[in-house]
Image (cartoon, rainbow, N blue to C red):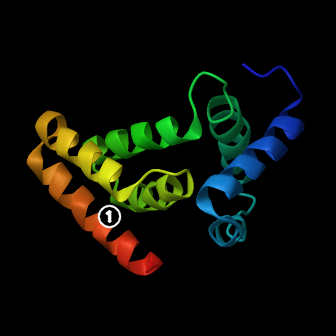
Amino acid sequence: MDARPNKEREKDGLKTRTEVLGKAWVEKSQANVDDFNREFNEYLHSHCWNDIWNRPGLPRKTRSLLNLAMLTALGKEHELKLHIRGALNNGVTKDEIKEVFMQAACYAGVPSAVAAFRCAREVFASKE
């Protein structure tokens, strides 16, 4: 775990989140931070986007592929769409995304993969 002060880790996590998900999306998300969810937002940046995403053990592309598989298995379509965009930003190809969903069909179930393919088509269409 990163031993730096939380504010530094939060700042670096916000930078990583912006690089992966895109400036426009992060700015829109940050506009919704209020007193109720501020601590959760700080947690996301310092722990998830810094302490995990900035670990040296895996490249961002691999982390994106893992997220796609896990979000497919969990059926978290909103987050899946977001991370499909992030995966494309991290250099993951459409064919690699397809292969993740094919594997997920086998291990997480066909209905989960059907939803994942649908999400990907929506994201691909919005980027073209």
Check disc 1 and report the residue beneath it: 120
The percent coordinates of residue 108 (x first, y second) are 18, 38
Give the quarter of the image for residue 103: top left
| Figure check: 6 above or below 36 | above
Count of marks placed on residues: 1
Residue 57, above or below 64: above
Q: Residue at x 67, y 69 (%)?
A: 32
Q: Secondary structure at mark 1?
A: helix
The amino acid beneath tag 1 is Ala
Q: Is residue 3 above or below residue 22?
A: above
**Where's residue 1, x and y in %?**
72, 19
Does the rendering let one see residue 37?
no
Asked which quadrant contains residue 12, the reply is: top right
Q: Circle 1: is it few (<14), some (14-19), or many (20+) Cα within 10 Å?
A: many
Left or right for 114, reference 39:
left
Counting from the top left corner in percent of width and height, residue 40 is at 66, 46
Most foreground residue, 18 or 44: 18
Q: Is residue 75 visible?
A: yes
Camera-side residue: 18 or 62?
62
Q: Write the residue at 18% across / 51% down.
A: 113
Rendered-image quadrant of the C terminus: bottom left
Q: Residue at x 26, y 41 (%)?
A: 73
Q: Position of residue 52 (x, y in %)?
A: 62, 31
Residue at (15%, 43%) from the top-left corner?
A: 105
